[in-house]
Structure formats: structure tokens, C-alpha cells
Image (tube, rainbow, N blue to C red):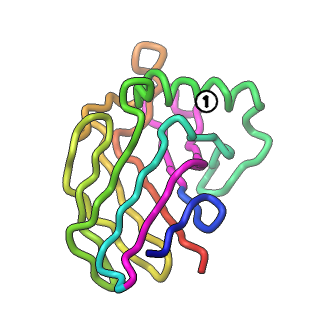
């Protein structure tokens, strides 16, 4: 059974800002550094586990483009801490799991366990990349907000998994 991890695949999470003070906030590209994806030999089953404590902010995204240097290392660490402790509650919910229920050339359907809740999800396939949008409240996750809600993250995030063959 072929197995992929951060040495042979890439998992990225994209978050988007909103709110009255969104002009001073940033959309983010976040790397999941600890995960494992297993594919069955015949390609009909996919299972994956992700460590929510392994999320690392790569950079801000400004006008749809990566913006290295916009965030300091200190800013990145603070954001990572907020994600792990205040959003994902990773001390309590240590693993994110995905198990496919139906695999096709252009789509993978399955069950995602995130933040202690299981929900059906669909991933769109484009070659070796699978993409899904997750609505955080569906998993009992309150999107991050600060300054009495004037600065917040949209409830929908995007997750992209790319396997390097």
C-alpha cells in the first residue's frame, strides 16, 4: 500500500480574512508538516491522518499572491499558537482522520473526523491534487476572531493535498 507523508506530498490550508478590520489582517497559506496518506494498491481506498499541532504558517497571501516577509517569525508563531490552542483545541483533539467511501477519477468522497466530529466531505481531484472546502462550524470549530469580531477568519477554508509521484 503506497504511503505518502511530508517528504513525498504537500498539504496546505488556506484561510481568508473578513470583518471591519480585515484590511489590517492577512489571508494565510499554512503547511501541515505531519501527516500520512495511504492509498490502496488498486486506488479505490484512501486513508489519511493529520496532526493538527503541526500546522506552520508559511506566509501571508495578499491579492491572491504569496507575500513572503509580510509576517515576522514572531507573528507566525503567535498565529500558529492561536490555531492549535484556541481554534483546533489540539491538546484534546490530537488527530484529524479521513477515510474514503468512494473514489473516482475526478472526486473522492469520504468521512472526515476533525475536532471530535465526523462529517461527509468531497474532494475534487485534479491530477495528483485533491482540494476541498471545509466549513469550520460544521465541525464545531468557531473561526478565529479578535477585537470583538472586527477581525476574523471566514468560516470556510480550503485544503489542498498534492502527492508527488
Where on the picture, by quarter, is residue 80?
top right
Where on the picture, by quarter, is residue 46?
bottom left
Q: Residue at x 29, y 72 (%)?
A: 108
Q: Is residue 4 visible?
A: yes
Quarter of the figure that contains the C terminus: bottom right
Quarter of the figure that contains the N terminus: bottom left
Residue 98 placed where, x, y %? 32, 56
Q: Nearer the viewer, residue 26 or 51?
A: 51
Residue 125 placed where, x, y %? 39, 76
- The residue stretch that appears in magenta: 12-41
Examine the structure image and report whether residue 96 is included in the region drawn in magenta.
no
Pointer 1: what residue? 24
Residue 22 placed where, x, y %? 52, 32
Question: Badge 1, how many Cα within 10 Å: few under 14, some, many 20+?
Answer: few
SS class of the residue under badge 1? helix
Q: State whether residue 2 is above or below residue 25.
A: below
Q: Nearer the viewer, residue 48 or 151?
A: 48
Q: Nearer the viewer, residue 12 or 146?
A: 12
Examine the structure image and report whether residue 35 is included in the region drawn in magenta.
yes
Q: Is residue 118 left or right of residue 159?
A: left
Q: Residue at x 41, y 65 (%)?
A: 131
Amino acid at each position: 500500500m503506497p504511503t505518502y507523508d511530508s517528504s513525498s506530498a504537500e498539504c496546505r490550508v488556506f484561510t481568508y480574512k473578513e470583518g471591519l478590520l480585515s484590511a489590517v489582517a492577512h489571508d494565510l497559506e499554512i503547511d501541515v508538516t505531519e501527516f500520512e496518506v495511504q492509498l490502496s494498491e488498486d486506488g479505490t481506498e484512501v486513508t489519511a491522518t493529520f496532526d493538527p499541532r503541526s500546522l506552520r504558517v508559511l506566509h501571508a497571501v495578499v491579492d491572491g499572491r504569496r507575500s513572503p516577509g509580510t509576517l515576522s517569525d514572531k507573528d507566525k508563531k503567535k498565529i500558529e499558537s492561536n490555531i492549535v490552542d484556541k481554534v483546533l483545541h489540539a491538546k484534546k483533539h490530537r488527530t484529524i482522520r479521513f477515510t474514503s467511501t468512494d473514489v473516482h477519477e475526478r472526486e473522492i468522497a469520504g468521512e472526515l473526523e476533525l475536532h471530535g466530529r465526523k462529517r461527509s466531505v468531497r474532494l475534487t481531484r485534479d491530477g495528483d491534487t485533491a482540494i476541498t472546502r471545509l466549513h469550520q462550524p460544521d465541525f464545531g470549530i468557531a473561526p478565529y476572531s479578535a477585537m470583538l469580531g472586527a477581525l476574523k477568519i471566514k468560516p470556510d477554508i480550503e485544503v489542498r493535498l498534492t502527492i508527488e509521484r
